[in-house]
Amino acid sequence: MASAEEDSDRLLSDYTNGFMVSQVLFAACELGVFDLLAEAPGPLSSAAVAAGLGTSPEGTELLLDTCVSLKLLRVDTGGGRALYGSTELSRRYLARNSPTSQHHILLYLAKTTYLCWGHLAQAVRDGKNQYVRAFGVPSEEVFAAIYRREGRPGLCIQVTRPRWALGQSEGLDRTLTAGPLRCVPGDFFKDPLPEADLYVLARILHDWSPEKCAQLLARVHRACRPGGGLLVIESLLDADGRGPLTTQLFSLNMLVQTEGRERTPAQYRALLAAAGFTDVQCRRTGGPYDAVLARK
């Protein structure tokens, strides 16, 4: 049985080296490791992977073996030769062509979020996001450049009839094929909102200050039909704000990247009540995001 000192040493080591694990995942995505292996007719040697990617043989082998240790890839060493292949996880979530791929969001985390987190101490000092330090320009310019590159509007309204949902544009192109859904470019702080029975704000309010949240919620309340409602999808903090850990990390992410934060159920109830909503119900889902339902 491990001693308390050994447990502490292991915990400190895990926390200290955590960024290395993230960078292995990000690098393998950026280089196309998971795409190459998912599309190959069978397992490949590290030399074949290196040739396919145009990478160094030594560096490729080191990266592949680390991905195996992280259970992102599998290896078959039968016949005295190491052959690397996809896992169910890498095929489903890391290969670019999978319908459930997380490839693009992982590259965003690598190229944007990771750089902002390098300035977390400064964000705590001044209480502001760190885009200027990370990129030399304000956050608005960074996101504008991303949307121009991706050919997507900055803010969108996802539409289903007879319901409307407000959301960010990332990933909506894949959702559009799933049903009667269309994407309308717009700014939900300025442009008219349609009258509807139900609105969904999914991972929106955590981006904004209480003042901006109040502004948006008031606009939704005015547009909502009597008896209609609003469903808020966010990660809820515990009542004292000291957990769950994932939500606390999300909240720090809002600090370094936005003007918002994650909130407790009581804080969401206060925001919604101030906008005129009633019968606010908060439900934990057991996943990273929870649900808050309110009625007009």
Image (spheres, rainbow, N blue to C red):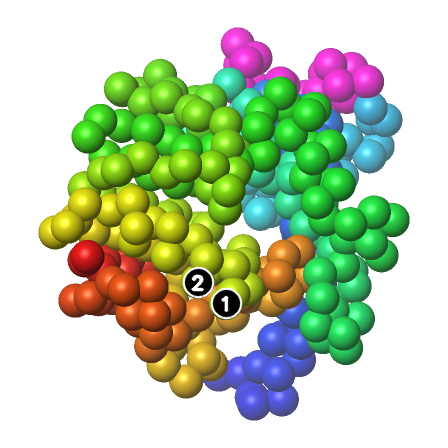
Mark 2: amino acid: Ala
Q: Quadrant of residue 141?
A: top right
Looking at the rendering, which quadrant does residue 19 occupy? bottom right
Which of the two residues, 6 or 23, is positioned nearer the viewer here? 23
Q: Amino acid at mark 1?
A: Pro
Q: Is residue 169 left or right of residue 268?
A: right
Q: Which residue, given by chain and number where applicable, does mark 1 sit on? A: 210
Question: Magenta includes 189?
Answer: no
Residue 48 on the magenta segment: yes
Q: CA distance from mark 2 to mark 1?
A: 6 Å
Residue bearing mark 2? 214
Q: Residue at x 87, y 49 (%)?
A: 136
Image quadrant in which you'd find residue 253: bottom right
SS for dot 2: helix
Q: Judge by depth and name the residue closer to the eye, 92 or 86.
A: 92
Question: Crowdedness of circle 1 by 10 Å Cα count: few (<14), some, many (20+)?
Answer: some
Q: Which residues are magenta?
A: 36-54
User: 248 or 229: which is nearer to us?
Assistant: 229
Q: In this picture, is 76 found above or below 117? A: above
Assign the C terminus to one quadrant of the image. Answer: bottom left
Q: Are marks 2 and 1 in contact (CB under 8 Å)?
A: yes
